Image (spheres, grey):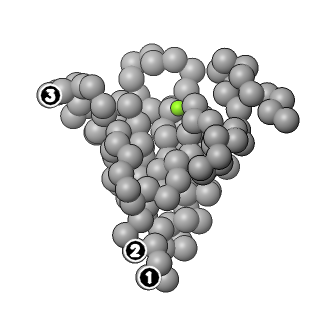
C-alpha cells in the first residue's frame, strides 16, 4: 500500500448506491448492487479506507440508532466479510463520495459535471 492514501478515505452512500433501495420497508438494508460493491472491494484491495456515508445514522438515537448500526454492520459482513466504518459526516480526509444523490462539480469553477436524476436537472449541461 502506498503511503499517499493512509490518512484519507473514500465515502460510499448506502441506499441506492451500494444497496438497492425501494422504500424504507422494515428499515433493513437492501440487496447489494454488485457493480458498486466490486468498486469498494477493489479500493480496499488497493489499500484505501472505504466508509459508508449514510443518513441512516444521522438523526436517530438510542435503540433505533443501534438497530441501524446493527443492520449495516451485518450487511457489510455479508457483503465484504467485515464491517466498514459508518458515518454521516464528511471531513477533510474524504477524497470523494459515491452517492446516487450527489451532483459532481468541478473544483473552483462551479462547472456541473454530473446530473440530478431525482429532479431531472442538469441532464444537458453544455
Ligand atoms: Mg442514496
**Label 3 secondary element:** helix
Q: Which mark identifies residue 62?
A: 3
Q: Can you give x and y, in whole percent of width and height, for residue 113 in the image? A: 71, 42
Q: Which residue is mark 1?
A: 3
Q: Residue at x 45, y 16 (%)?
A: 25
CA–CA distance in space, label 3 to label 1: 38 Å
Q: Can you give x and y, in whole percent of width and height, for residue 21 in the image? A: 55, 27
Q: Mark 3, residues whose alpha carbon is within 10 Å: few (<14), some, or many (≥20)?
A: few
Nearest to the observer: residue 58 or residue 30: 58
Q: Which residue is mark 2?
A: 6
Q: Can you give x and y, in whole percent of width and height, for residue 90 in the image? A: 38, 46
Direction from residue 82 to residue 48 in the image, left or right: right
The answer to whether mark 1 and mark 2 are in CB contact below 8 A is yes
> Is residue 86 visible to the viewer in this orientation of the structure?
yes
CA–CA distance in space, label 3 to label 2: 32 Å
CA–CA distance in space, label 1 to label 2: 5 Å
Which quarter shows the C terminus? Answer: top right
Q: In the displayed structure, would residue 76 be above or below residue 25?
A: below
Pair 3/2: label in front: 2
Ligand 1 is within 8 Å of the C-beta of the residue at disc 3: no
Nearest to the observer: residue 27 or residue 5: 5
Amino acid at each position: 500500500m502506498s503511503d499517499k492514501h493512509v490518512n484519507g478515505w473514500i465515502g460510499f452512500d448506502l441506499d441506492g448506491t451500494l444497496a438497492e433501495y425501494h422504500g424504507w420497508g422494515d428499515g433493513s438494508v437492501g440487496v447489494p448492487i454488485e457493480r458498486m460493491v466490486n468498486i469498494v472491494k477493489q479500493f480496499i484491495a488497493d489499500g484505501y479506507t472505504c466508509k459508508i456515508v449514510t443518513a441512516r445514522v444521522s438523526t436517530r438515537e438510542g435503540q433505533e440508532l443501534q438497530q441501524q448500526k446493527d443492520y449495516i454492520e451485518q450487511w457489510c459482513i455479508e457483503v465484504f466479510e467485515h464491517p466498514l466504518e459508518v458515518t454521516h459526516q464528511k471531513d477533510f480526509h474524504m477524497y470523494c463520495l459515491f452517492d446516487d444523490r450527489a451532483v459532481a462539480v468541478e473544483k473552483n469553477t462551479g462547472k456541473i459535471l454530473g446530473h440530478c436524476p431525482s429532479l431531472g436537472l442538469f441532464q444537458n449541461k453544455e
